[in-house]
Each structure stands twice: as C-alpha cells, then as structure tokens.
Image: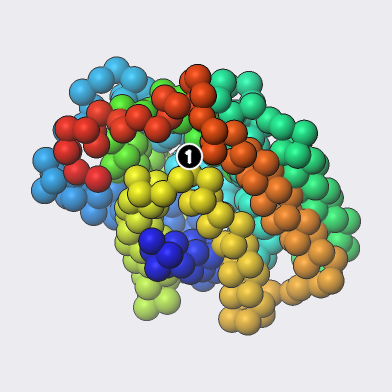
Amino acid sequence: MMTVALVLIVIWGTTWAAIRIGLEGIPPFTGVALRFAIASAVLLAVAFLARIPLGRSRIERRLWLLNTALTFCASYGIVYWCEQYVPSGITAVLFATFPLFVALLAHFALPGERLTPGGAGGILLGFAGVGVIYSEDFASLGGAKVAVASAVMLASPVVSAFATVAVKRWGKEVHPLSISAVPMGLAAILMAGVALAAERDLPIVFDATSVGALLYLSILGSALSFSLWYWLLSHAAATRVSLISYLNPVVAVGVGVLFLREPITLRILSGSALVVSGVALAAHRRAIPSRAPRGPIRETRERPRWRREGRGG
C-alpha cells in the first residue's frame, strides 16, 4: 500500500505542472473537456468489462449531477483558468486548503465528524498560511492578474469540498467508478460547450508537448489515479490515505521551480509550510475519534453494497 501511496503522491503532485505545460498549446476549458473525455472513456470501458451496473438508484444519478457540476466542471475549470496566471506550485498550495474546507463542512453535515479544538486550530493555521502567501509582493510574480487569479483559485477547493461531503453523506452504496466515470463524461460535454462559446477564436496546438501533457493528465492524472485512490480507501483508513494530500504541494512546488522556472520566495515557502502543517494538524485531530468508534461512527466501517456483492472495485 505504501508503494501505491507514493505513486499517487508523484502523479498528483506533478499534475499541476502538467496542466501548465498543456496550457501552452490547449486553452483551459478545451483542456478540461478533452482530459475528462479521455479519462471517462477509459473508466467506462473498465466498468463495462467489470460488469459494474451504473445509474440504478436515484441518489446515484443525483450524485452524478453534483459531481459533474462541482468536482469536475467548476473545480477543474477554475484550476485550469487560474494556472494561466498563477505558478503551478502556488495553485497546488492554495488547493491544499481543500481538507480544511471539508473539515468545516463535515462538522455541520456529518454527525460522526465533529470538529475538535485541535482541528479548529489546524484550520486557522492553514488559513494563516494562505494569508502569508497573499502578503507576498505579487508584482514580482506577475502583478494584479496573479493576485486576482489566486483569489479565484480558492473557490476550487471550496466547491470540491461541498461535493466531497455530499458524496460522503449520501454515496456509501454507490460504486466509486460510477461517481467518477459518468460525471467525468458529462463534464466533458458541458465543458466542450463552454470552450466552444469562450475559446472559439483561440488557437489550439496539438504538438508533442501538449498532447503528451493531455494524455498524462487523462490516463495517469485522472483514470489511473482515481482507481488507485479508491483501492487505497478500500484497504486502509481514510485518515491515513488523506496524508497524501499534504505531500502533493511539496512535489508541485519542487517541480515548478526545477522544471518550469517558477519563482519561489521565503515568504511563499513559509506560507506553504503553514498550510501543510495546518491541514496535517486538522486531519490528525479529526482522526482521534475513529480509533474508538461508537454510535454512528461504527456505521462508516460497514462495507458498501457494491463491495459486499463483489461488483468490482
């Protein structure tokens, strides 16, 4: 399992740089549409071969729409647009606030995941890190556009957190491939419409670099990584698996500096360290109740129907 976790850290930590590379030839919304069209085709083929039934319940179909709108259209649309102006390392750090927003929302929406004082302290520490990053002189990084795009970027982890909490609350009986493959396909269709309206006059260059980045993001960064992620969740505690999320920005910042020549300063490093530390503290404090489950928390360990019936995964 450690090997799988390391593979995920490397893949997801490098996708931020791959997005920026792909943007040199493919406009953002077009890139999102193509990425999820390819990834959805791969995952739907796997679901077909594994004979996994899709769309049998009303809640499953509602989660399709929710994940389509929030996880794949809104969140990734924002990420791709922002990476036109914001260094990939900073976008990764800003998205690392995602677990903090999940913690806040879960406190109110998930009875078994109440926020503790330690968790609240971690959230405050993480947002302090964002404040340190924003205190940077953005003129040295690209001026007002970088500052505005960085602010917009924070909407991505927020909408993703809403979708994650909803899936956690209502998606226990839904197969993971259903929640990812079908929404990816629907998102590809919707984002193709957005791209047609907003990027009709923008040039598209399908050279070796842009196509390579697209295939990397589609097959490794989406189809394979989601499959590995769900495999880990079925074999290890969710709190242990979540440790992956705070190592991704470390990889992303390093790749951006070494290979894309993105700027890095002591203030950005300090803010990044606070964000990662805050997320780690919040996740650690929230993991404590899971070691002594009682009441509703015990129900979260029940195997979902798709696992009990042996339908893939």
Q: Position of residue 90 (x, y in %)?
A: 69, 61
What residue appears at the point 51 percent right and 51 percent down from the top-left corner? 240
Mark 1, Cα crowd under 10 Å, few <14 / some 14-19 / many 20+, is: many
Q: Position of residue 106 (x, y in %)?
A: 59, 28
Q: Is residue 63 left or right of residue 158?
A: left
Residue 283, picture quadrant: top right
Residue 304, picture quadrant: top left
Q: Which residue is mark 1?
A: 71
Identify the coloring: rainbow
Assign the C terminus to one quadrant of the image: top left
Q: Is residue 119 left or right of residue 242?
A: right
Look at the numbered disc 1 and give the secondary structure of its residue.
helix
Q: Is residue 14 above or below residue 75?
A: below
Q: Is residue 281 above or below residue 67?
A: below
What residue appears at the point 35 percent right and 49 percent down from the top-left corner? 235
Q: Is residue 136 above or below residue 211?
A: above
Q: Amino acid at mark 1?
A: Thr
Q: Is residue 25 left or right of residue 288?
A: left
